[in-house]
Image: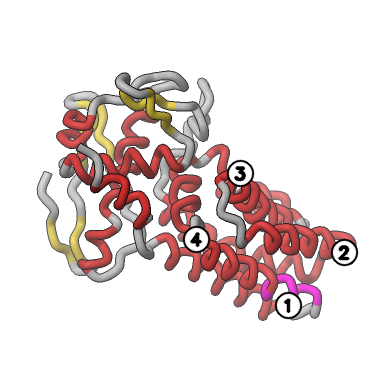
Amino acid sequence: MADTVGPHGPQRSDVVWRTGVSTVSPSQLRRKPRPERARRRYLDVAEQILSGLILDHHRAGDRLPDERTLADRCHAARSTVREALLALELAGIVEVRRGAGHYLTGVGLPGPNPPISSVTSAAPAELLRVRRLLEPEAAALATRAATPSELRRLQGLVERSATLASQDGDADLDAFLHLDLAFHRDLARMSSNLVLAGLVAQLVDAGQHPLWLLAHRVALRHPEARLAQVEEHQLVLDAMVAGRTEAAARSMAEHLGELSARLAAEPASRSAGRLNRSP
């Protein structure tokens, strides 16, 4: 379907994933001006592909439709679909079997009985929007309630993240992402509000949110972005140690704002280079 222009920029129309059966309306990532938006199209298509597969109840080992079919379903150029598939491959969500196509690995896919209110198919931008509402309050509450040992545990997570931040290997990136999410989960747990802690844990759980994992991996592939992430965590923690509740909440809000901006930043240039060599 064609794009339309609304008061806040171009808006993508609903995409019919299975004609007459279900309609997928993937939420878009945070927008930049039109030139920047065009550079992020491949992530939108990755969202559409994965959302459609989830709604169709695909499982690990299932083969994805071919590029032409995906391009038709997503109303995208085949070159954009190739970029999207490579992003999914980099995230470990699909694997390429030479001469046989793309297959789901099962990473991040919902289990056989996902809850009705599951947010596994929500866009990263939507998850971040909710996190920006909840986590500053969690930081403020945790500043008042945290014990010295809990603060030391958070400091340990920050220091381990700093050690991995400048490493380029995929295993190091995976470890960094898990430490990053553990920081947010543990901080929310320190708020002593079980409901708030549970909501935050659900939102940051990479294993439950494949779209978030994909975008997070792409946004933090470069060491500079990971180092900035560590510095922002340290600012939150410093305010907590000092007992400054407002500063902790503000630093958390600023950190999530910066993360949102990183998600809307440059595409993986190395991926584009590989795709340009594709037939």
Q: Which residues, given as a range, are shown in magenta?
A: 235-241
Q: Which residue: 31% across, 64% down?
A: 31
Q: Amino acid type of disc 2? A: Thr
Q: What element carries label 4?
A: loop
Mark 2 vs 1: CB contact within 8 A: no
1 or 4: tag closer to the N-terminus: 4
In which image quadrant can residue 32 be found? bottom left
**Cα separation between marks 1 and 3:** 31 Å
Residue indicated by mark 3 = 171
Disc 4 to disc 2: CB gap under 8 Å: no
Mark sitting on residue 239: 1
Q: Which amino acid lies under the numbered mark 3 shown in the image of this protein?
A: Ala
Residue 195 highlighted magenta (yes or no): no
Mark with earlier residue (4, 3):
3
Look at the numbered disc 1 and give the secondary structure of its residue.
helix
Disc on the earlier residue, 4 or 2: 2
The residue sitting at 36% across, 63% down in the picture is 266
- Measuring from the top left, give residue 78's x and y in whole percent: 18, 40
Where is residue 109 shown, x and y percent of the image? 48, 31
Q: Quadrant of the C terminus?
A: top left
Total numbered circles: 4
Reading the image, the residue beneath label 2 is 147
Q: In this view, does 90 lie above or below 217?
A: above
> Residue at the location (67% across, 75% down)?
235
**Which residue corresponds to mark 4?**
222
